[in-house]
Image (cartoon, rainbow, N blue to C red):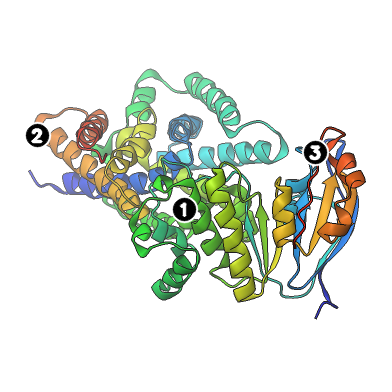
Amino acid sequence: MLDAQFIYSLITGIFVGGISGYLGSLMVTKRMSLVGDALGHVALPGIALALLYNINVVIGAFASLVIGILLIWFFKTKSELHMEALIGVVFAVSLAFAFLILSHEELEEALIGDITKVNGIETFISVILVLIVFYIARIIYSKMILATLSEDLAMSQGIKVRKYDLVYLLIIGVIVALGIKVVGSLLIGALVVISPAAARNFSQNLRQYSYGGMFLGSLSCLLGIIIYKLFDFPAGPIIILISAAIFLISFIFRKK
Amino acid sequence: MENRPILQVKNLTVSFSGDKILDSLSFDLQEKENLIIVGPNGAGKTVLLKAILGIIPFTGEIKWSKKVKISYVPQKFFPAKEIPLSVKEFFNFKKNSQQEIEKWLKSVGLNNSILGKRLGEVSAGQFQRIMIAWSLIDNPDVLLFDEPTSGIDVGGEETIYNLLSRIEKEVNLTIILITHDLSVVYKLADNVLCLNKKLVCYGSPQQALSEKSLHQLYGEEINIYKHDHA
């Protein structure tokens, strides 16, 4: 039962789930909870092209995300529109584009993911990328929180808010690209949001909150992949349902 | 002591989409001076602070003396309740020394037990004290404070200003403060700057706050009362 494939899935799931929870905790406080959802779809044209030309889908997804994110960021700095609206536009265009290119089966795999197909090299690369993203996220975390409290206050402290926003969006892009393998582009938003929301229910400080989100993200993926192995349900949806169950429990036992 | 201006502002103009919010403003700020900015809503007081902080675009000249360290407390700044950030973590954004943090908490009249609380669950009065400690913990030369009293009950108001004036004497700070409350001006200000897009009056409170300038500032209806002390 403990074949290499299963181990690869577990390792990838635990790392990607953990970093999603950690980055997601920032997203939830910045009221960007739906950005993960939208970016999941922004990745689709890249996935489509990758399948068409036989490239690794994570690379395709990331390329498409980078373009989408730069567009969103560019429009954001040049116009008065909210980030939300801009993401909405890029998201819809991406979706239309993907539906045009992808076949039915390909679309399904892109939408709900298939972690059971990851190989050794992909696992290794995922782990390295997750570690790099974690390192960057730790550096920008407190600055991003300060900017969330008050952008003016952060700027008065010499924090380049725009620059950090872009770095933040780009590392989310990396995680969304990786997460698509795990839960698919339809559910990546949930992977990023549910665990931090659960962690917030019992957190008294940022440390508990961010690392709580990380722990619950990893735990959901671990349990989801085990259940997949035992009962052969698709891993992606199961991972999300488990994290939702954890959220419910945390809600019932939440502080005050 | 009051010879070298710490800040020189010349012909400062700020426009947002064609509208002039500040119109060719000039003034100097001396070291250790307390400058209080008064003016009606929409007069550009907050914009002035942001401009001299350099966080919004402007034309004209803003010259700080070299190596000046500035702290800023924004207006209507309340921590979002949903962010699980403890008071201690908030201080750790700036300094990690527990000793320093406790020293400053004590000097703003707060107890160490507040460190474990969430920033979103302290009272508005406590939060304002935390902000004062937070902005002073890295020993700035200048403190820019936008409306300390906004949203705080009158009972708390008095003590925040007393607190500021006590600390200001202890650490020799230059302060620029915005307020709506003219009585504060007489207590704290060396100079007062009345602003309504343009400079309406400037000088010591007794000089600058004449009946005429206040009418110019707030319109005819205002009842003026002048404190005798100060």
Vertical placement of B192 versus A173: above or below? Answer: below
Q: Residue at x 17, y 27 (%)?
A: A233
**For mark 1, what is the residue?**
B126
Instruction: Please state the chain letter of the residue tagged with numbered disc 2 in the rendered image.
Output: A
Vertical placement of A125 versus B91: above or below? Answer: above
Question: Callout 3: helix, strand or loop?
Answer: loop
Q: What is the quadrant of residue B76 in the picture? A: top right
Q: Residue at x 66, y 56 (%)?
A: B145
Question: Callout 1: helix, strand or loop?
Answer: helix
Q: Position of residue B203 (x, y in %)?
A: 87, 60
Report, in whole angstroms, how far the alpha carbon at label 3 lies from the one at label 2. 80 Å
Vertical placement of B51 versus A242: above or below? Answer: below
**For mark 2, what is the residue?**
A230
> Looking at the picture, which amino acid does disc 3 mark?
Asn
Report, in whole angstroms, how far the alpha carbon at label 3 lies from the one at label 1. 32 Å
Report, in whole angstroms, how far the alpha carbon at label 2 lies from the one at label 1. 54 Å
Instruction: Please state the chain letter of the residue tagged with numbered disc 3 in the rendered image.
Output: B
Can residue B9 be seen in this snapshot? no
Judged left or right of residue A9, residue A190 is right
Q: Tell me whether marks 3 and 1 sit on the same chain.
A: yes
Q: Quadrant of the C terminus of chain B?
A: bottom right
Q: Tell me whether marks 3 and 2 sit on the same chain.
A: no
Total label count?
3
**For mark 3, what is the residue?**
B223
Q: Residue furthest front?
A: B228
Question: Callout 2: helix, strand or loop?
Answer: helix
Can residue A216 be seen in this snapshot? yes
